[in-house]
Image (cartoon, rainbow, N blue to C red):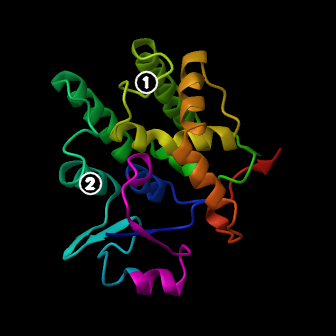
Amino acid sequence: MKLYIGNQNYSSWSLRGWLIFAQNNIQVDVVKLTLFTDEFYQSLQAVSPAAKVPALVDNDVAIWDSLAILEYINENVLGGKAWPQNQSLRGKARALACEMHSGFSALRNELPMNCRAIRKVDLSDLAKKDVARVDAMWSEQMKQNPNAWLFGEWSIADAMYAPLALRFKTYQIELSDLARQYQEKVLQSEAIQQWLAEASLENDIVEEDEAGTDI
C-alpha cells in the first residue's frame, strides 16, 4: 500500500488518514508531497481525481478521502476494531466522526493546522461556537472514559479529531479541564509525537495556512 500525504506541518486531512496506520503499526509506503506545487498535482493526477491528499493506493484500488481511507483500512486490515464494538457506541462514534468530516468550517478556516507555530487569533462568533461544541463533546466523552480515548479504545473518531488538539495548542485555545485532558492524551501519544517530529524537519511555507500573529 502507498499513502500520499501533504506537508505534515499543515495537512490536517493527511494526518487523519495517516493515523490509522501509525496507531496500529500497519506497514504503508508514505509519499509526502509539497502542497500546491506542480509536483503535487502531477503526482496525484493518476491517483486522485480530486487532486487532494491523503490518497491511498492498494494494488488496483485508489481511495482519496480521509474517512474513506480510515473505513477501508478498518474493514480490510483491522477487522472492524477501529470502531467501538458496542453497537450504540459505534453509532455515536460514527456520528461524531461525520460531524468533524462535514462540519466546523469556521474553526477549520480560522485555525488552520500549523504544527510549528504558536499564534494568537481573534475568533469569529461562529468559530467560538465550533470550539465550544468540540469542548462539550470531548468533555462528555471524558466523563465516561477518564484519561482514555473518546470511546475508551482508540477509534476512527480519535483520528478525525486529532488535528484539533494540535490546532488548539498552536492558537492557545482555552479548554475546560476534561477537554484539556483529552487534548493532552492526543498530544502525548506516540503517533502524534512521531508526526510532529517529522513535521519539524520541513521548511516549506504555505502562506494561506499562516494565520494569526506570533506570541
Residue interval drawn in magenta: 21-43
Image disc number at residue 73? 2
User: Residue, x 66% and y 39% (percent of image)?
Assistant: 169
Q: Amino acid at mark 2?
A: Ile
> Which residue occupies the extreme top position in the image?
143
Label 1 environment density (alpha carbons within 10 Å; few <14, some 14–19, many ≥20): some
> Which residue occupies the extreme right position in the image?
215
Label 1's element? helix
Closest to the observer, 150 or 134:
150
Label 1: which residue? 137
Disc 2 or disc 1, which is closer to the eye?
A: 2
Q: For residue 126, say whether it is visible.
A: yes
Number of on-image labels: 2
Q: Amino acid at mark 1?
A: Met
Magenta-span inclusion, residue 80? no
User: Residue, x 38% and y 80% (percent of image)?
Assistant: 44
Closest to the observer, 124 or 158:
158
In the displayed structure image, the side of residue 42 where residue 179 appears, left or right: right
Q: Quadrant of residue 89?
A: top left
